[in-house]
Image: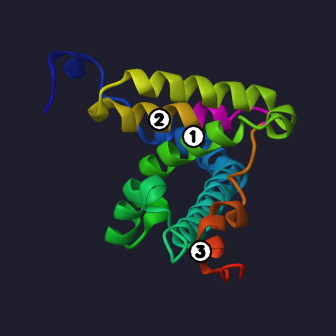
Amino acid sequence: MPFLADLDEAPRSRGRGMLIGLAIAVPVCLILGAIVLPRVRASVMSGAEAHDKAARERDTYMAAICGEGMDLERDEDLCGCVWATEYPGLDCLDRFDEWLVVQQAQRCGQSSVFDSGPGYCTCTQAVVEQLDALPPEGRLAEAAAGHRRCAGLDDALPPPPLQSMLRNFEAADAPLPEG
């Protein structure tokens, strides 16, 4: 549609500007695509692999805890979730964090364990003290957040060894001493 300005002067062709824009944009996009995108993809994939590996390890740990050696009083909330889901390492993460922070705080009561991770032990014990003051409905989220904060510390301890957690079952299976 012609405008009044077009009567005195013919409209200029936009082809030259488009070609210059394409000449600049195509190499820039190719360079970004060749350099940046593979690095972004590799970063995302390695993060996903690490997350999957951690979830599988949690699945295995929770399955062992909720197996035959389960201590009903200690593990009831955690195992109720583990048995009800297909992927407990993902679906029961908050309950596992709550369970783990309580277990770690109890474990940190031993001086040898406390000495190996004083910052982590102090953190977990503080989280458990805060949890005791919370109503039950706010406890799960706060415990999960507290455990994640503590687990990020440099001296964080690994989960308790399975042998120590399953000790109750093994002791119950042992033959009674005669006498």
Secondary structure found at label 1: helix
Asked if the residues shown at circle 2 and circle 1 are in contact, with their CB atoms under 8 angstroms apart, the answer is yes
Q: Earlier in the sequence, mark 2 or mark 1?
A: 1
The quarter of the picture where residue 125 lies is top right
Does the segment drawn in magenta span residue 56? no
* Residue 42 x/y as whole percent: 68, 58
Whether 85 is drawn above or below 14: the answer is below
| Residue 35 appears in the rendering | yes
| Magenta-highlighted residues | 148-155
User: Along the line of sight, which residue is nearer the eye, 88 or 160?
Assistant: 160
Which quarter of the image is occupied by the C terminus? bottom right
Q: Which residue is mark 3?
A: 172
Q: Earlier in the sequence, mark 3 or mark 1?
A: 1
| Residue 13 appears in the rendering | no
Q: How is the image coloured?
A: rainbow
* Residue 56 x/y as whole percent: 58, 68
User: Along the line of sight, which residue is nearer the eye, 129 or 177?
Assistant: 177
Q: Which residue is mark 2?
A: 143
Q: Which residue is mark 1?
A: 101
User: Badge 1: few (under 14), some or many (20 or more) residues near its Cα, within 10 Å?
Assistant: many
Q: Residue at x 48, y 53 (%)?
A: 74
Whether 18 is drawn above or below 6: the answer is below
Task: Quote the CA–CA distance across marks 2 and 1.
Answer: 7 Å
Q: Residue at x 71, y 79 (%)?
A: 177
Tally of numbered discs = 3
